[in-house]
Amino acid sequence: MSSKNLDTLYRQVIMDHYKNPRNKGVLEDDSLTINMNNPTCGDRIQLTLKLEDGKVADAKFEGEGCSISMSSASMMTQAIKGKNIEEALKLSKVFSDMMLGKEYDEDDLDLGDIEALQGVSQFPARIKCATLAWKAMEKGVSTEKEEQE
Amino acid sequence: MNAREIRQMFPILDQEVNGKPLVYLDSSATSQKPVPVIETLDKYYREYNSNVHRGVHTLGTRATDGYEGAREKVRKFINAKSTEEVIFTRGTTTSINTVAASFGRTNLTEGDEIVISYMEHHSNIIPWQQVAKHTGATLKYLPLQEDGTISLEDVRETVTADTKIVSIMQVSNVLGVMNPIKEIAKIAHENGAIMVVDGAQSAPHMKIDVQDLDCDFLAFSAHKMCGPTGIGVLYGKKKHLEKMEPVEFGGEMIDFVGLYESTWKELPWKFEGGTPIIAGAIGLGAAIDFLEQIGLEEIEAYEHKLAAYAMEKMSAIDGMTIYGPKEASKRAGLVTFNIDDVHPHDVATVLDAEGIAVRAGHHCAQPLMKWLKVSATARASFYLYNTEEDIDKLVSGLVKTKEYFSDVF
């Protein structure tokens, strides 16, 4: 089995997030809810965000999908918590570049577990799985931003 | 039928994917194309590409003969009474949409009912949702039995005197069940309703006789039956088609065009606005010739054998859930499944690394996924070029998938 390839996709840390998702659940009160799905494959995410003073005070997700989409959601919520909105969007850009196999500019951002998803870029059919949660976050954060502006 | 010999006629199958010989098990999504179909398309574009029904020149006549000749092949293929009843469309989706937009919106009104089933493909759901929205008609769903089959008892209960349209797939792209269309059509007619058949998954695999089924409309696509993409068929009984208005207007479909009023060509051309899919139709004709040479009965019997073999081998894998009827005799050549604790996308990715192509997702059947209480499934689908060896490779790929995921956890 050409598991060498597969191992770049299914990294241990990804499987850990899949099996033990962080920030799973739904935030109550004044939180922002974003529902997004991947119509071609049935993956679905509900992201709830609590934005306070231009920061992501809290983030939780619910959903169903493959190991890549769910672990990515788990990592994303972990990464953006405590970040300000600009930083969260910057992270999203870095992630998107990473998925496209482009050079990405980490700056002084801490990518943490997210880097484990780098291997997805070699599996074009799975990129959409990985970006679902990030798209949901971008959508939520930018609606909020527009309202403030 | 010799699948090994047939396989030689599909050049695409002779390649390696990710370093392994390709095992193509996604024919329900689209089938591969044999040499005679590829050569027919090549010949058309090299030798007689021309617009149809208008040119006086020789190439125009050849193209028209080819295009109309393909219509006659389709007529024979489904045993329609005349070529007036055979309309070329872009595919099953366009065919069903044509019936919905033309027949549905004109003939239905508030209080009328449309009956479909839980197993339908989105292309046999959404057009009817739209008809219901526009006309105020009610959309009703036939329930399914535990094993995913439709019971005639339920059909008798669901179809009423208010039902105007019953639209059901002949073979399910997920459950593999073969629905009793002839009997359902009879019940529809007894209640004054018309019977629409989604033949996307049946036309490639079994002999269809529209007169025997007594269906009012039948829709199918060429690309699932060894033909090119972008072409399909809408069969309709002449008595309906005659009264129906075209859905697309423009060149090719007109008789006389005035400043404010126009009249339409006779059947079937009034439904074929614009330059038709000439190469596609001729390619479909070649695909029909190819399938008929082998024999649809032969193909069906062979696929039953493959399905039975796959069911036996796959159900022996620990943690395997197979959807649809357990008896191979009730199934067409596909198996939809899930493996415990491994998401179907991940199954498909691991199999792909083994050169095995399967489909993962909701298979354009979200209501059915809801009924099955799953968000997605994996599906292996077979066609005349697949062999038991392909299934053996699938089975060992599935065993490896299980092992791989129990290792990484």
Image (cartoon, helix red, strand yellow):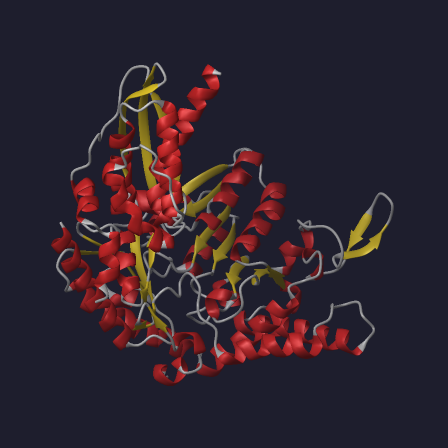
Looking at the picture, tell me which residue is in the foreground, B320 or B73: B320
User: Residue lying furthest right in this view?
Assistant: B259
Looking at the picture, tell me which residue is in the foreground, B263 or B162: B263
Looking at the picture, tell me which residue is in the foreground, A110 or A47: A110
**Residue B104 appears at what percent x and percent y?**
58, 44
The N terminus of chain B: image quadrant: bottom left
Looking at the picture, tell me which residue is in the foreground, B78 or A74: A74
Q: Is residue B259 left or right of residue A116?
A: right
Quick check: B238 above or below B126? below
**Residue A132 appears at what percent x and percent y?**
36, 39
Residue under the image location 46 percent in, 65 percent down: B224
**Residue B258 appears at what percent x and percent y?**
87, 48
Q: Is residue A142 visible?
A: yes
**Residue B327 appears at what percent x and percent y?**
23, 64
Quick check: B222 above or below B148? below
Dividing the picture into quarters, in which one does residue B87 lie? Answer: bottom right
Q: Is residue A66 visible?
A: no
Q: Is residue B217 left or right of residue A29?
A: right
Q: Is residue A15 left or right of residue B378?
A: left
The mark total stands at 0
Residue under the image location 52 percent in, 37 percent down: B132
User: Residue lying furthest front in this view?
Assistant: A107
